[in-house]
Image (cartoon, grey):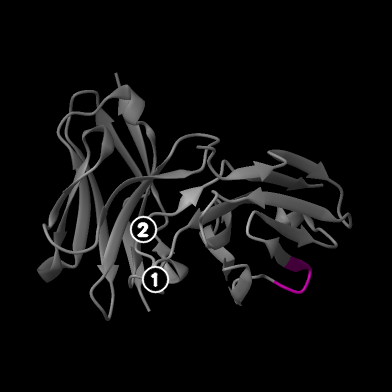
Amino acid sequence: DAGVIQSPRHEVTEMGQEVTLRCKPISGHNSLFWYRQTMMRGLELLIYFNNNVPIDDSGMPEDRFSAKMPNASFSTLKIQPSEPRDSAVYFCASSLMVGGLGAGELFFGEGSRLTVL
Amino acid sequence: AQSVTQLGSHVSVSEGALVLLRCNYSSSVPPYLFWYVQYPNQGLQLLLKYTTGATLVKGINGFEAEFKKSETSFHLTKPSAHMSDAAEYFCAVSDGNNNDMRFGAGTRLTVKP
């Protein structure tokens, strides 16, 4: 089975440009998470979806960040305009929630390393 | 809300020595506890988890962890370190809902030959 697939693996862009990160969760999983990892702040939850619906986006840093999940097999995280402080590794993870609870593991993608110059 | 504290951002052991990575949690409800490992340039992968039942949990690669409610701890151990164990390790806690999983700051394990 394919795991969580993220693209691009690496992105280098200039300040002010739009960045779109993509994620394909594991087939059958109904929860999707976007995390950001930096040396200073560690692993931060940005937003999560249940059954394609955004449930909590309180971790999204500011309005420059937006995320969508148009269907069960695809999600995007967009930064517009990008800034140097957005440089980080962005992880997508998926899991299966049963009966409203999800104590199962999160399956992480390999991450998208973003560098904003 | 739950939280996790990992004591020691860096731990260095010799090959063959005991590995002990410390994790203490705070939770107002019975916690679900996890250890994840991250190898360079990769995502996190699950080592082991505790939900209910036996408090000593065995995971992959010879790792195990023990849930101690009285100490609010979930320390990760391995009797004999291998070079391949060098990685970053994250402890995480949730209330049974993955949507509220909180990760610790991570502990980087170095294994010396």
Q: Nearer the viewer, residue A65 or A100?
A: A100
Given the image, on which type of amino acid does mark 2 rest? Answer: Gly
Dot 2, how many residues are within 10 Å of its Cα: few (below 14), some (14-19), or many (20+)?
A: some
Q: Nearer the viewer, residue A50 or B88?
A: A50
Q: Is residue B81 above or below residue B46?
A: above
x, y (%) of residue B42?
52, 37
**Location of residue A36 by image quarter:** bottom right
Chain letter of the residue carrying label 1 = B
Q: Is residue B28 above or below residue A43?
A: below
Residue at coordinates 71% horizontally, 65% vertically from top-left?
A: A67
Q: Nearer the viewer, residue B73 or A50?
A: A50
Q: Which residue is mark 1?
A: B97
Given the image, on which type of amino acid does mark 1 rest? Answer: Asn
Dot 1, how many residues are within 10 Å of its Cα: few (below 14), some (14-19), or many (20+)?
A: some
Q: Is residue B101 visible?
A: yes
* Residue A104 circle label: 2
Chain letter of the residue carrying label 2 = A
Q: CA distance from mark 2 to mark 1?
A: 9 Å
x, y (%) of residue A5?
61, 43
Extreme-top residue of the structure: B113
Q: Is residue B82 above or below residue A100?
A: above
Q: Which image quarter holds the N terminus of chain B?
A: bottom left
Where disc 1 sits, the SS reads loop
- The stretch drawn in magenta includes residue A27: no
Q: Main secondary structure of the magenta part?
A: loop
Where disc 2 sits, the SS reads loop
Question: Which region is colored magenta?
Answer: A62-66
**Location of residue B12 by image quarter:** top left
